[in-house]
């Protein structure tokens, strides 16, 4: 069977049954992942996230989907990025129709999956980890706009809508805790009302997964170097490149690069699963 958006969607649900209802949910928002084009890379990103969940379960982990997304599945398909107004650019995510701005704020702070393995908890995020950005800015460092497709972070996060215009959040990990409040506001600046932290050092970003349907070696290596510059602390995040074309990049710790044009969906998933098993084994060790 060839690789199509439909076969990728079906495979994602098999990898992670916990997300099946969200994967199978049809709406205007989910179309950009499952009904447009393979070239966007969004379906590969979702498949990779589900493959990570499957590999974590093989190691004995429990996988949890935050209730927010069970109740409002459209929110799962937007990025872990605080909504912001960027010069009234058309189509910016802060103005997505049918999604309340306050829901977007809560969704931005909420991991797409929780991985519980032994006494440790990890959050899996898509294209951003807002607490890292808030922590970076509050420590007088420059704002960044480079975000890997998937981030795996040690620790747990809770985000609660206090009122229609305020979201409270907390984060706890081995380095300490932080909490704060965001103003629900579509603004140019990050609408931080308060932020308190006893976190020591750089937040524990454990893994980076980059997904593509044809990323060349030079571009992939350049991106990875930028990610490591932003997210490395006492530990360097473990990196994985999932590429839908056979263009390898030796700079990543792991890579699954297969030519989707000449590979069956079964072979593609088998290769991805094998690589992801090795990656997860080291990541969650």
Image (spheres, helix red, strand yellow):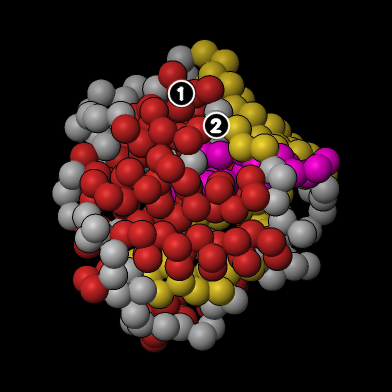
Q: Is 169 located above or below residue 275 in the figure?
A: above
Q: Is 24 located above or below residue 200 in the figure?
A: above
Question: Helix, strand, or loop for circle 2?
Answer: loop
Question: Helix, strand, or loop for circle 1?
Answer: helix
Residue 254: % across, % down: 56, 74
Look at the numbered discs 2 and 1 and tell me whether their residues touch, using CB distance below 8 Å.
Answer: yes
**Which segment did they paint magenta?**
112-130
User: To which residue does mark 1 refer?
Assistant: 70
Relative to 152, 93 lies left or right = left
User: To which residue does mark 2 refer?
Assistant: 65
Residue 19: % across, % down: 45, 34
Q: Is 278 located above or below residue 83 in the figure?
A: below
The earlier-in-sequence mark between 2 and 1 is 2
Q: Return the residue nearer the eye: 10 or 161.
A: 10
Q: Return the residue nearer the eye: 196 or 72.
A: 72
Main SS, magenta residues: strand
Q: Residue 165 carries which label?
A: none
* Residue at the outermost top position: 163
> How far is the residue under mark 2 from the one under mark 1?
7 Å
């Amino acid at each position: 069977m060839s690789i199509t958006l439909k076969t990728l969607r079906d495979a994602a649900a098999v990898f992670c049954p916990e997300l099946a209802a969200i994967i199978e949910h049809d709406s205007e928002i989910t179309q950009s992942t499952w009904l447009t084009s393979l070239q966007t890379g969004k379906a590969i990103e979702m498949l990779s996230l589900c493959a990570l969940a499957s590999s974590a379960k093989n190691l004995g982990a429990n996988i949890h989907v935050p209730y927010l997304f069970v109740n409002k599945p459209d929110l799962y398909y937007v990025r872990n990025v605080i909504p912001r107004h960027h010069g009234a650019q058309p189509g910016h995510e802060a103005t997505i129709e049918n999604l309340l701005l306050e829901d977007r704020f809560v969704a931005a702070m909420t991991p797409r999956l929780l991985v519980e393995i032994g006494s440790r908890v990890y959050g899996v995020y898509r294209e951003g980890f807002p607490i890292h950005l808030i922590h970076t800015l509050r420590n007088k460092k420059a704002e960044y706009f480079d975000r890997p497709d998937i981030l795996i972070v040690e620790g747990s996060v809770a985000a609660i809508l206090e009122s229609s215009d305020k979201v409270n959040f907390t984060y706890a990990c081995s380095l300490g805790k932080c909490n704060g409040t965001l103003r629900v506001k579509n603004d140019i600046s990050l609408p931080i009302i308060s932020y308190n932290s006893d976190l020591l050092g750089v937040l524990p970003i454990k893994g980076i997964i980059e997904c593509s349907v044809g990323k060349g070696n030079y571009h992939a290596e350049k991106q990875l170097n930028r990610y490591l510059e932003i997210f490395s602390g006492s530990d360097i995040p473990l990196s994985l490149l999932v590429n839908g074309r056979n263009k390898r990049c030796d700079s990543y710790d792991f890579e699954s690069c297969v030519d989707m044009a000449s590979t069956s969906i079964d072979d593609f998933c088998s290769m991805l699963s094998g690589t992801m098993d090795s990656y997860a084994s080291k990541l969650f060790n």
